[in-house]
């Protein structure tokens, strides 16, 4: 959805699969797989941030306009 509206997502940390909170079958496998694939080139983080995945990994997603200036 973000990409469709001109945004990109910078990901940090590790992500394996969503923790199954809520109703049984609440995880959309296609969405979960797409989210998981974002992390194949993610930069590591040295702290836990956000809701953990099924393996307890912390991860951070920054959504920004594709034209935003990035800092090095």
Image (tube, grey):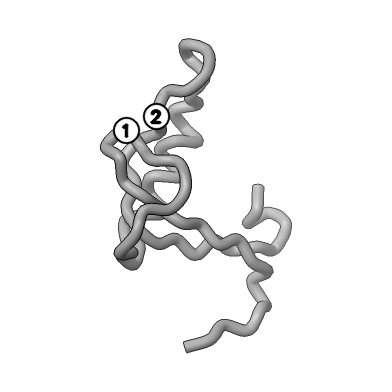
26 left or right, relative to 2: left
Q: Residue at x 49, y 65 (%)?
A: 10
- For this orientation, the residue located farthest to the top is 24
**Residue at label 1?**
54
Contact, CB < 8 Å: mark 1 with mark 2? yes
Alpha carbon separation for disc pair 1 and 2: 5 Å
Q: Residue at x 68, y 69 (%)?
A: 65
49 left or right, relative to 62: left
Please name whichever residue, 13 or 28, is drawn nearer the observer in this view of the structure: 13
- Where residue 43 appears, as percent x and y from the top left, is 34, 67
- Where residue 19 appears, as percent x and y from the top left, is 39, 29
- For this orientation, the residue located farthest to the front is 47
- Where residue 48 appears, as percent x and y from the top left, is 36, 53
User: SS for tag 1?
Assistant: loop
20 left or right, relative to 68: left
Dot 1 or dot 2, earlier in sequence:
2
Which numbered circle lies on residue 1? none
Residue density around tag 1, few if under 14, some if 14–19, many if 20 or more, within 10 Å: few
Please name whichever residue, 54 or 37, is drawn nearer the observer in this view of the structure: 54
30 left or right, relative to 6: left
Q: Residue at x 32, y 33 (%)?
A: 54
**Residue at label 2?**
19
Examine the rendered structure and indicate whether residue 11 appears above or below residue 18: below
Q: Residue at x 36, y 50 (%)?
A: 58
Residue density around tag 2, few if under 14, some if 14–19, many if 20 or more, within 10 Å: few
């Amino acid at each position: 959805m973000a990409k469709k509206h001109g945004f990109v997502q910078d990901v940090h940390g590790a992500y394996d699969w969503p923790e199954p909170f809520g109703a049984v079958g609440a995880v959309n496998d296609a969405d979960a797989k797409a989210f998981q694939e974002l992390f194949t080139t993610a930069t590591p983080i040295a702290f836990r941030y956000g809701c953990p995945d099924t393996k307890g990994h912390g991860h951070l997603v920054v959504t920004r306009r594709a034209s935003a200036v990035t800092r090095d």
